[in-house]
Image: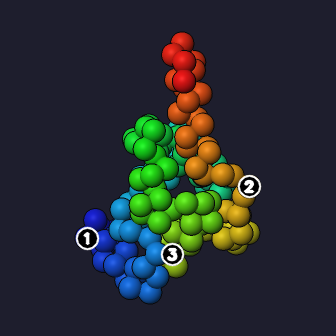
Amino acid sequence: MSVSEFWLAVERIRAGDPRYARDAYAFVMDGLDHTVSALEERRHVTAEELLEGLCAFARGKFGMLAFDVLRSWGIASGRDVGDIVFHLIDAGILSRREEDSREDFDTPLDLKRALEDSYFDVTDASGLEN
């Protein structure tokens, strides 16, 4: 799929469900690539692995502002990521296994805390005090 075909698909998705910004879809795709690239071998990732990978990707890309950036795009929970992923699946951009479902993204993960606390954990490890 070309870049222009991707953006056309995103616009079709957003016409039916405008909750998420265009950039949210690109972020999930880039974060998925980041997550898969960190694996020893290329394979299907679980919702939990994707959420962890997206958090790491967001922290690396946006630092302390990661949650604010994601929230500005409409992403405030794992469920939001799942909705984006399944929109991309329905559009034929991503694939899924039969056992994959949106509910896999309904986790107790507090996205805000995962993004912000991890930043301070890194700061603490560097010897700086919060």
Q: Which residue is mark 2?
A: 108
Residue 95 rendering spot, x and y as whole percentages: 55, 68
Q: Which residue is mark 1?
A: 4
Residue 32 rendering spot, x and y as whole percentages: 50, 53
**Residue type highlighted by circle 2:** Pro
Q: Judge by depth and name the residue closer to the eye, 81 or 69.
A: 69
- Disc 3 to disc 1, C-alpha distance: 17 Å
**Residue type highlighted by circle 3:** His
Question: Across the whole image, how many numbered discs are drawn on residues?
Answer: 3
Residue 103 lies in quadrant: bottom right
Which quadrant: the N terminus?
A: bottom left
Task: Label 1, secondary structure: give it.
Answer: helix
Q: Residue at x 54, y 12 (%)?
A: 127
Say if 5 sits above or below 31 in the image: below
Q: Which residue is mark 3?
A: 87
- Look at discs 3 and 2 and give the one toward the viewer: 2
- Look at discs 2 and 1 and give the one toward the viewer: 2
